[in-house]
Image (cartoon, rainbow, N blue to C red):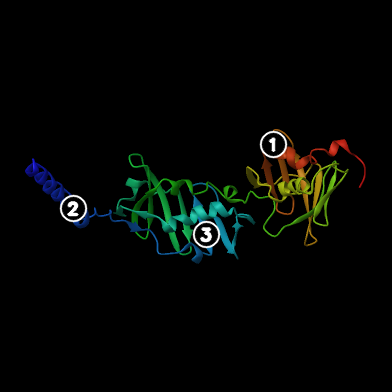
């Protein structure tokens, strides 16, 4: 009986020692080789040129920490869209293919070309099997994640910033159609008065305007016919907004930019209506 226990103990020790040896000395599998598409860093890029397959080329310039569209029109650029464009600089591919047969990858007539700094990236066909995008740059073809294709805007309008106000534009008074709101002593006051509302509730209404972000923004080349709203800024400037439509969505035109902003109905209701309770007290402040 004792011999059996000793045999089992020895066997257990052998198994433990073998397991430890395998864990310590085993060779980890090698990671597949990958290739960087660029050595450029996003912070180094000051100029971007987008050449879609149809439509006018788009030029963007960095101004401090922000980007602006400079051609074919002038407008603030959407920071998130620009960041997605710049992400190609950090992309890596496990395939680097010769550029001798561009037609094979639809790169003889690319979907779009994007030049970041001095490096151009051409976007070609989609590999349906691997769900990867073929990109030509530096005389080689790379297969990169499909997200890089989605990052390329269809035109300049898709790059327009959707925030109604630019960073640094701080509203301190709103002259709307049915009421006025002004910042007084750090709290928003309304005429007609909103009645029994807390300072936080009043400030929340103003924050809705300050942070207003449209579902889409586009150039407006027609008239500015419609009711006018005036926004007074902290720096003394005023911004005129024209109400182009109320349904099925609210459309506001910033005449100083020539850009119209489209808002969802629920957002429109919060922006254009006084805070809850205003209807209960119409006395003048």
In the image, taking residue 63 as reference, residue 226 lies left or right, namely right
Name the quadrant containing residue 205. top right
Give the residue at x 78% y 47%. 202
State the CA–CA distance, disc 1 to disc 2: 62 Å
State the CA–CA distance, disc 2 to disc 3: 53 Å
Q: Is the residue under label 1 in contact with that under label 3 (CB below 8 Å)?
A: no
Q: Is residue 246 visible?
A: yes
- For discs 3 and 1, the disc positioned in front in the rendered view: 1
Camera-nearest residue between 7 and 138: 7
> In the rendering, which numbered label is found on residue 266?
1
Q: Residues within 10 Å of mark 2 (few under 14, many from 20)?
A: few
Q: Is residue 107 visible?
A: no
- For discs 2 and 3, the disc positioned in front in the rendered view: 2
In the image, taking residue 97 as reference, residue 80 lies left or right, namely right
Of helix, strand and loop, which one carries label 3? Answer: strand
State the CA–CA distance, disc 3 to disc 1: 36 Å
In the picture of the structure, the residue carrying the numbered disc 2 is 22
Q: Residues within 10 Å of mark 3 (few under 14, many from 20)?
A: many
In the image, taking residue 225 as reference, residue 59 lies left or right, namely left
């Amino acid at each position: 009986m004792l011999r059996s226990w000793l045999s089992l103990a020895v066997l257990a020790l052998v198994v433990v020692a073998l397991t430890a040896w395998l864990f310590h000395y085993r060779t980890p599998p090698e990671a597949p080789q990958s290739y960087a598409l660029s050595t450029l860093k996003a912070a180094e890029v000051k100029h971007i040129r987008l050449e879609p397959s149809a439509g006018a080329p788009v030029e963007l310039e960095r101004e401090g920490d922000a980007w602006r569209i400079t051609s074919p029109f002038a407008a603030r650029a959407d920071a998130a869209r620009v960041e997605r464009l710049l992400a190609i600089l950090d992309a890596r591919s496990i395939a680097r293919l010769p550029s001798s047969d561009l037609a094979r990858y639809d790169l003889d007539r690319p979907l779009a070309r994007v030049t970041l700094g001095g490096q151009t990236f051409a976007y070609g066909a989609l590999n349906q099997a691997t769900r990867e995008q073929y990109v030509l740059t530096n005389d080689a073809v790379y297969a990169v994640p499909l997200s890089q294709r989605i990052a390329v805007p269809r035109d300049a309008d898709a790059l327009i910033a959707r925030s109604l106000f630019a960073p640094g534009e701080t509203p301190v008074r709103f002259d709307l159609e049915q009421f006025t709101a002004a910042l007084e002593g750090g709290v928003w006051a309304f005429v007609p008065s909103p009645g029994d509302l807390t300072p936080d509730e009043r400030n929340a209404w103003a924050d809705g305007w300050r942070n207003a972000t449209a579902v889409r923004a586009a150039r407006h080349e027609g008239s500015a016919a419609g009711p006018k709203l005036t926004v007074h800024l902290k720096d003394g400037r005023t911004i005129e907004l024209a109400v182009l439509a109320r349904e099925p969505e609210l459309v506001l035109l910033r005449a100083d930019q020539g850009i119209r902003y489209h808002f969802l109905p629920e957002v429109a209701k919060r922006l254009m209506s006084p805070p809850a309770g205003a209807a209960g007290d119409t006395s003048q402040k």
